Image: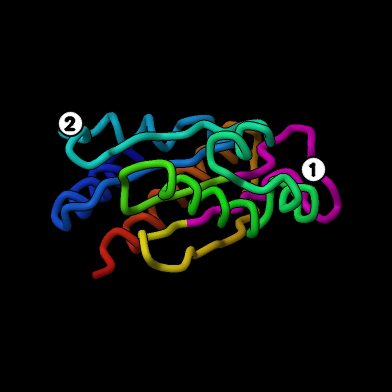
Amino acid sequence: MYVLAGKVGRQLQDRGRRLVTAESCTGGWIAQCVTSVPGSSGWFERGFVTYSNESKQELLGVPARLIATHGAVSAETVAAMVGGALAHSRADCAVAVSGIAGPEGGSPDKPVGTVWLAWQLKGEAPLTRCFRFEGDREAVRRQAVMAALEGLTDVCSAS
């Protein structure tokens, strides 16, 4: 995980970009990984931990009606989160995550392990993806962090 965070950092630094994170189910773990990399202050701008729906609305500008219609764990919500993170920071590359880490909280439509991620470069459309991770709460969160970092290596390396 930390090796991957270092790769993200090198890509951002090589392109003169800065990163912002917007995290729900990972609780700041992505930000913790990237800030463990020496020199990350040169490319990590800030992180938002928006665990509650209200914090998603207040800090990132996610519309309440969007969450009410689609749920906090949805493509629409993470797309709004990633866009809001860019809009409320000085970064130009962002990642957002919202999911159901368990052990409770799942439903037939969105079982435990459902995680939505979004990545975005400023000025471009967000890329969203749904994952269905296996394991306990720790395992789901760890897999979400890895997927977030892996997606950043693709987004951050774009021209």
- How crowded pointer 2 is (Cα within 10 Å; few <14, some 14-19, many 20+) is rated as few
Looking at numbered disc 1 in the image, what kind of residue is underneath it?
A: Gly
Tell me how many marks there are. 2
Q: Quadrant of the N terminus?
A: top left
Q: Is residue 128 above or below residue 78?
A: below
> Residue 30 is drawn in which quadrant?
top left
Q: Secondary structure at mark 2?
A: loop
Residue assigned mark 1: 106
Towards the viewer: 40 or 79: 79
Q: Residue at x 50, y 48 (%)?
A: 84
Q: Quadrant of the C terminus?
A: bottom left
The answer to whether 145 appears left or right of 50 in the picture is left
Q: Is residue 92 above or below residue 126?
A: above
Looking at numbered disc 2 in the image, what kind of residue is underneath it?
A: Pro
Q: Residue at x 45, y 32 (%)?
A: 29
Which range is magenta?
Answer: 98-118
Q: Position of residue 130 (x, y in %)?
A: 61, 59
Q: Residue at x 61, y 44 (%)?
A: 98
Q: Secondary structure at mark 1?
A: loop
Q: Position of residue 19 (x, y in %)?
A: 32, 45
Q: Position of residue 153 (x, y in %)?
A: 32, 57
The answer to whether 117 appears left or right of 32 in the picture is right
Residue assigned mark 2: 38
Magenta segment's dominant SS is loop
Answer with mark 2 or mark 1, whichever residue precedes in sequence: 2
Q: Is 100 colored magenta in this rendering?
A: yes
Q: Is residue 104 above or below residue 115?
A: above
The answer to whether 67 appears left or right of 83 in the picture is right
Q: Residue at x 28, y 68 (%)?
A: 158
The answer for how far apart the CA atoms under marks 2 and 1 are is 38 Å
The answer to whether 73 appears left or right of 91 in the picture is right
Towards the viewer: 16 or 109: 16
